[in-house]
Image: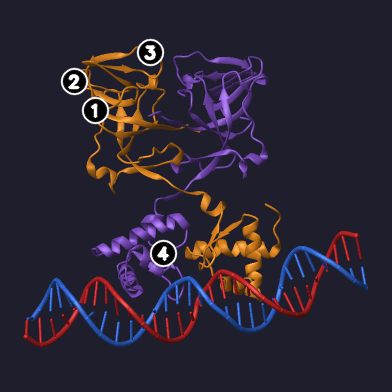
Chain colours: A purple, B orange, C blue, D red
Amino acid sequence: MSAISTRQQQILDFLREYHTDRSYMPSIREIQLACGISSTSVVDYNLRLLERDGYIRRDPDISRAIELVGESEADLVEVARIPVLGAIAAGEPIPVPEASAYAGGDHDSFALPPELTPRDPDNLYALRVKGYSMIDAFVTDGDIVVLRHTRDARNGEMVAAWLPMQEEATLKHFYLEGENVRLMPANPAMEPIIVPADSVQVHGKVVAVMRKVAA
Amino acid sequence: MSAISTRQQQILDFLREYHTDRSYMPSIREIQLACGISSTSVVDYNLRLLERDGYIRRDPDISRAIELVGESEADLVEVARIPVLGAIAAGEPIPVPEASAYAGGDHDSFALPPELTPRDPDNLYALRVKGYSMIDAFVTDGDIVVLRHTRDARNGEMVAAWLPMQEEATLKHFYLEGENVRLMPANPAMEPIIVPADSVQVHGKVVAVMRKVAA
DNA sequence: CTCGGATTAGAACGAACGTTCTGTAGAATA
DNA sequence: TATTCTACAGAACGTTCGTTCTAATCCGAG
């Protein structure tokens, strides 16, 4: 790509701005007006140069058929939108996802970055952490935990579990040992909990944790 | 949204297909042709219904100004790509971002979800956490910490600091108190560190933390 | 059956729009 | 100085395109 004139940069900037606003491209006369150009032929002239140099692509005879090549589209990333179903706190039952929740439910949603998205992005939901009861899992008040809804876990996986006897919600590593379940804190300095297998309700596996640090 | 007729579904499908191919929308006559409709007025009629029911949005008098609301555009999210400059560990100096790093450097990059992106997404970089020395900040091995590069912090902000005397990197809340700096662990059960202000190098403020939990 | 709303047809109008032609002014080149 | 290339200006032409008007057809409710 060769260097670009002020005029062409101006047009390019306007194209980007206009497109993010309206999701379609301006007409030549709109470019003319916005950039203070006195003739449509000048716009056409510069668009030709921009196309020759590979900044845009045009479809002849078609209105507003300008495409920005590369860049602008490049940092648009496809992310999984997952619903935030509610909060998880020590003494409160864990919200249960209904089938409808994953679709276009009226929940808040959260964009999980691709780096944290599992191969299989189904049955994911998120909960906001309330309180400081899960610091043994390096999770603190205000964090978002992303869960995959499942009723059974494999050994070693971190699960969100509800203990009906204790009336307690917790995030622990899961180990099934015969009749019992051992729930191991992520922090090895803390003590495990061992409870009968039938008094543990696994609500999902923890997939990711994210935290926005207050300014 | 009310139910949708076969014809309208057909048009909607064509809009999606056409848009992914060309990145702009078809004209009414192109819709007519593609869907085997005998009159442009029928296309217009059905587009009106689609707009009334909230499936699309149109800009009157403007060619090809049809927007698909929600869905197709919705899971494409503009995210900030931030460079991962290296690792942060207790006994190792904190990597310093060079000016070139933020641009098209050859670093790994990470897509920060919009929910965690600050108003001002400049000077952001990320570090991978090595080891378990920062559990008092609820940060553990393998976490990604997102930092905003700055040399001075305001009281209360969580910073990434390097203590040259102790040769130690740490994440703590920052409080300047006269000649000294008090570094408070996020976990209130831990003890603060108080050091002379000139023996603390603030490398950046912590903006976000993210963790992928092992399957 | 009749009535009324929903859907389709055909045609035409006029605005929006891309394109092209002619011409000018300045900078670069020789 | 003469020449050429770049950038801009103004106007006009011919499509493309959204819109509208009228009328026909279909179909379920009463």
Name which of mark 1 and mark 3 comes first in the sequence.
Answer: 1
Q: Is residue A199 above or below residue B37?
A: above
Q: Residues within 10 Å of mark 1 (few under 14, many from 20)?
A: some
Q: CA distance from mark 4 to mark 1?
A: 45 Å
Q: CA distance from mark 4 to mark 2?
A: 53 Å
Q: Which amino acid, by three-letter code, is at mark 1?
A: Pro
Name which of mark 3 and mark 2 comes first in the sequence.
Answer: 3
Q: CA distance from mark 4 to mark 3?
A: 56 Å
Residue visible at 58% across and 74% down in the picture: B29
Q: Which mark is residue B198?
A: 2
Of badges 2 and 1, nearer the viewer stands 2
Of badges 1 and 3, nearer the viewer stands 3
Q: Which amino acid, by three-letter code, is at mark 3?
A: Met
Q: Are marks 4 and 1 in contact (CB under 8 Å)?
A: no
Q: Which amino acid, by three-letter code, is at mark 2?
A: Asp
Q: Toward which corner of the image does residue D13 lie, by quadrant?
A: bottom left
Q: Residues within 10 Å of mark 4 (few under 14, many from 20)?
A: many
Q: Which residue is mark 4?
A: A67
